[in-house]
Image: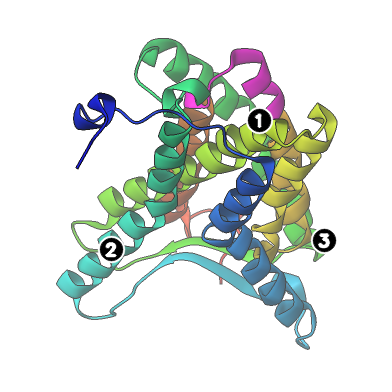
């Protein structure tokens, strides 16, 4: 049986991927990840607005116990949820390698750690205070649910799990919604403006469970992140910024809830 020399060496020739294949691939990636989250958030939002209570009196719980009263089982569920949520990122990395590129081409690597950290910290500082003020205003006006960033039990793994959850959120969202999606939409012939709109609306959609404020605020953040990605050519700073924002929200709520009057609680 004849086998080509290149294949015996383990190197397969690169084949052009059709637009139809790329289109199907993109739909499947989103259906397995944040596109499905967007549909889930929409259903949740419909459920919230059709309840007799106002949005402001309802709560959106993020990091909650999966096994109350059983801390080790709870920890296992928390780590399972965090790790499985990153499977779409691994899939995206595989798909990019298949086409002959990789996550390095979207700037998700360790080549520039200090510039990524510095830029990410600056972005987080700029967005953090503005985003908090916008959330408080929307919640007070009745356009947003009361967001409960965490309600985990006071056990030793609480803060490490919250940090891991924040990092997972940032990697999943920035790699898929910015780096991967913009690359695929460009290959499919979308204009830069249309791709920016799609990315930012998608980001807003899967935050709709928080209310109108969550949708609008995250859509605006999506526009900013796409523009910064196009300027820097890297998702690394965006992952850092997003992680710092979520860490601040999760740990800040854990430390301040019930102790300061300006922070809404349930």
Quarter occupied by residue 181: top right
Q: Is residue 128 visible?
A: no
Q: Is 231 left, or right, of 66 in this rendering?
A: right
Q: Is 139 left, or right, of 156 in this rendering?
A: right
Q: Is 94 left, or right, of 106 in this rendering?
A: left
Residue 1: x and y in percent read 19, 42
Q: Which residues make up the magenta segment?
A: 225-236
Mark nearer the N terminus (3 vs 1): 3
Residue 48 or 27: which is nearer the viewer? 27
Gap in angstroms between the C-alphas marked 2 and 3: 37 Å
Instruction: Return the residue at label 3.
Output: 141
Image height of 159 relative to 67, above or below: above
Image height of 112 relative to 251, above or below: above
Q: Is 80 left, or right, of 195 in this rendering?
A: left
Q: Which residue ends up furthest to the left in the rendered image?
A: 72
Image height of 20 relative to 231, above or below: below
């Amino acid at each position: 049986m004849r086998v080509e020399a290149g294949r015996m060496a383990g190197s397969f020739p690169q084949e052009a991927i059709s637009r139809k294949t790329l289109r199907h691939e993109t739909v499947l990636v989103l259906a397995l990840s944040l596109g499905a989250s967007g549909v889930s958030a929409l259903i949740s939002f419909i459920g919230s607005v059709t309840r007799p209570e106002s949005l402001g009196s309802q709560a959106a719980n993020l990091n909650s116990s999966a096994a109350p009263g059983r801390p080790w089982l709870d920890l296992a569920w928390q780590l399972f949820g965090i790790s499985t949520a990153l499977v779409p990122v691994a899939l995206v990395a595989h798909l990019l390698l298949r086409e002959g590129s990789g996550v390095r081409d979207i700037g998700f690597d360790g080549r520039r750690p200090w510039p990524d950290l510095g830029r990410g910290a600056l972005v987080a500082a700029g967005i953090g205070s503005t985003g908090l003020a916008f959330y408080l205003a929307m919640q007070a006006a009745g356009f947003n649910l009361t967001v409960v960033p965490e309600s985990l039990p006071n056990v030793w793994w609480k803060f490490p799990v919250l940090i891991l959850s924040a990092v997972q959120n940032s990697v999943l969202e920035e790699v898929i919604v910015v780096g991967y999606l913009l690359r695929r939409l460009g290959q499919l012939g979308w204009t830069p403006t249309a791709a920016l709109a799609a990315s930012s609306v998608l980001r807003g959609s899967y935050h709709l469970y928080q209310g109108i404020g969550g949708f609008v605020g995250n859509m605006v953040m999506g526009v900013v992140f796409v523009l910064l990605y196009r300027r820097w050519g890297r998702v690394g700073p965006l992952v850092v910024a997003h992680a710092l924002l979520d860490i601040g929200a999760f740990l800040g709520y854990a430390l301040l809830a019930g102790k300061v009057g300006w922070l809404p609680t349930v």
